[in-house]
Image (cartoon, rainbow, N blue to C red):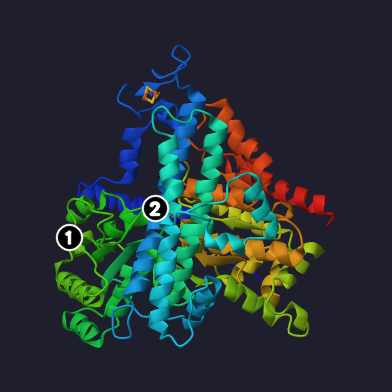
Amino acid sequence: MKTFDHMTTIEQMESDTAKLKEIACKVCAETWEDRNKSQTPHCKFGEDGICCKNCSMGPCRITAKAPRGICGADAHAIAGRNYLRTIAAGTASHSDHAREILHVLHSTSPDGSYKVRDEQKLLNLAKEWGVPTEGKDIYAVAHAVAEAGLEEFGKPFGFQRFIKRAPAERQKVWKEHDIEPRAIDREIATSLHMTHMGNTADAEVLVRQGLRTGLSNGWGGSMIGTEITDILFGTPTVRSTEGNLGVLEKDMVNIVVHGHDPAFSEMVVTAAEVKELVDYAKAKGSRGINIVGLCCTANEVAMRHGVRMAGNFLQQENAILTGAVEMMCVDVQCIFPALPALSDCFHTKFVTSSPIARIPGSIYVEFKTDTAFDQAKELIKMAIDNYQNRDASKLFIPESKNTAVVGYPCEQIIKHLDGVTNSHVDTLGSYRPAVDAIKAGVLRGAVGIVGCNNPRVRPDYSHFEIMKELLRNDILIVATGCAAQVATKAGLLNKDAKYLCGAGLRRVCELVDIPPILHMGACIDISRILLLVSGIAEDWGVATTQLPIIGCAPEWMSEKAVSIANYVVSSGIDVYLGIEPQVKGSSQMMELITEGTRKLTGAGYIINKEPHALVKSMIDGIEAKRAALGI
Ligand code: SF4
Ligand code: MSK
């Protein structure tokens, strides 16, 4: 049988990093590995979540000798409050990103920088939200929908509009347990208020508010963000691209876009196609302009333009260490404040663009919707002018790169499933073929693998080991965020990766013509996974809790990830974590997040730092769900 012979191993990736680290030493640059060493061992109180500084009587730390803070808060209250604050911050980040995108939609005009690309999606959303469209110009509809979306953040009454998209069973659960998400800003503010000194000290109540706040992200902010981004820049479609540091080009002007909000990167990508700029880059001695992405911005532009991906979170410094980056343009979230100093060791120009992410030492160009395109063109010109400043003695671009097929939002998944069922018209436009494959056991189940990488574990290793084992066991994977980029770097987003799969999954991949890992987008697009799982549950006629479908974040690190985990658990999907949430100092909190939430939502966390043990528990979990369904 044919084999899959172009997988990049973790060892190869680590060898590239080691060579780049030599360059770092040569230029006296510090990297996260150095800082990680000097931060280890980490503060035990912080790690266990039992340090409180919510008032200036403290900070208070919980020990056997001092089991309560000055106000009397115990370990459970303190860990619970810290946990809820983390969820609030994560929810705020995703949702504020969505708010920015709504403002971009509000700025659209036929001759402006930003236009409406997916008119049908806009009209569908207007209908869903009751926004009148008759006799209205598409841009008037866009502005009205943007206003309706912005109201989701601060409306005084009612719940998030998108919860109506969830299965009726879920909506009932949320209502019964009083965790239906209200206005997004309200859930965030309530969480901060509850955790202020002298308020809630009951861990169970704090966890419950965490679920509701998470829901205001998943079925609120994130879903709004995804939907509006599709309207503005087009709903992603399947396309080929490449990933890993080898996408940087030795003889081109390399510009890296990094962060999360595609409003900025879309303009950079579009401006890089302007003929005068391409000609200018050639006149300056290069072969042209090469835009590549990092982190979730990479996912956004890869899915819509095929822009190649330089790597994930812990690779951001590596990109600069190649000495081949003329400019790194960042927007928001997951950007190391270390980057300007590192850029100073090379010729790289480091540009920040958002008032949300100001970093000392950067060139700050605040992006405005009305001048965005011109600003992008100016930045590209600045990058081109910088090409001549490259220092050949510091140049090292690792060769590693892999091809990838990306761009599987729900619409594309359904389209592919339709392609194999055209003789059964009643299944068209549904997930029924996938349901049938799972029922028949050809597919054992599915896993959403999401999240970052993290120095607390060997970077990318857990992702990689878990992905390979799931594929071997006929379990389909959908991936977003930096997890999707591990798969890209490894080559697992190739259709050929079917040769790593069990016979059942391989057959499905062949029949549906898909890779065994479907790239569904950025972190904010985990909202797409919510809709996918809800759609499958409805087509199957069972609750989401019954499905052999689970979530996994093997190497998560951000507050957003904790918010995500909460909306996934609230949506009835078990979440397998490879990094412990920082609540270990409270036995009650540990019980609440692993078992307690099951009484409310039917799902919880399963935590194991060891990837092989974690993936075994995932497969066992999927098989247990199958057994309970009698399949
Ligand atoms: Fe200490 Fe209580 Fe103040 Fe926290 S809120 S710092 S536990 S006194
Ligand atoms: S970029 S949140 S490191 S996935 Fe979305 Fe990656 Fe995690 Fe940021």
Residue 489 position in % (x across, y down) = 47, 62
Neighbourhood count class around disc 2 (C-alpha, 10 Å): few under 14, some 14–19, many 20 upward: many
Q: Is residue 336 above or below residue 205?
A: below
Residue 226 position in % (x across, y down) = 47, 66
Q: Residue at x 58, y 75 (%)?
A: 411
Q: Residue furthest front?
A: 157
How far apart are the alpha carbons under marks 2 and 1?
A: 23 Å
Q: Is residue 31 left or right of residue 450?
A: left
Q: Quadrant of the N terminus?
A: bottom right
* Residue type indicated by callout 2: Ser
* Residue type indicated by callout 1: Ile
Residue that label 2 marks: 93
Residue 48 position in % (x across, y down) = 47, 29
Q: 382 or 121: which is nearer to us?
A: 121
Comes first in the chain, label 2 or label 1: 2
Secondary element under disc 2, as helix, strand or loop, is helix
Q: Is residue 267 left or right of residue 379?
A: right
Residues under numbered marks 2 and 1 in contact, where contact means CB atoms less than 8 Å apart? no
Q: Residue at x 24, y 67 (%)?
A: 367
Residue 617 in sight in this render: yes
Residue 248 in sight in this render: no
Q: Residue at x 44, y 49 (%)?
A: 186
Q: Residue at x 68, y 59 (%)?
A: 168
Q: 159 or 166: which is nearer to us?
A: 159
Q: 2 or 32: which is nearer to us?
A: 32
Numbered badge on residue 363 = 1
Give the total number of marks visible in the rendering.
2
Q: Residue furthest right?
A: 630
Q: Quadrant of ligand 1?
A: top left
Q: Is residue 473 above or below residue 66?
A: below
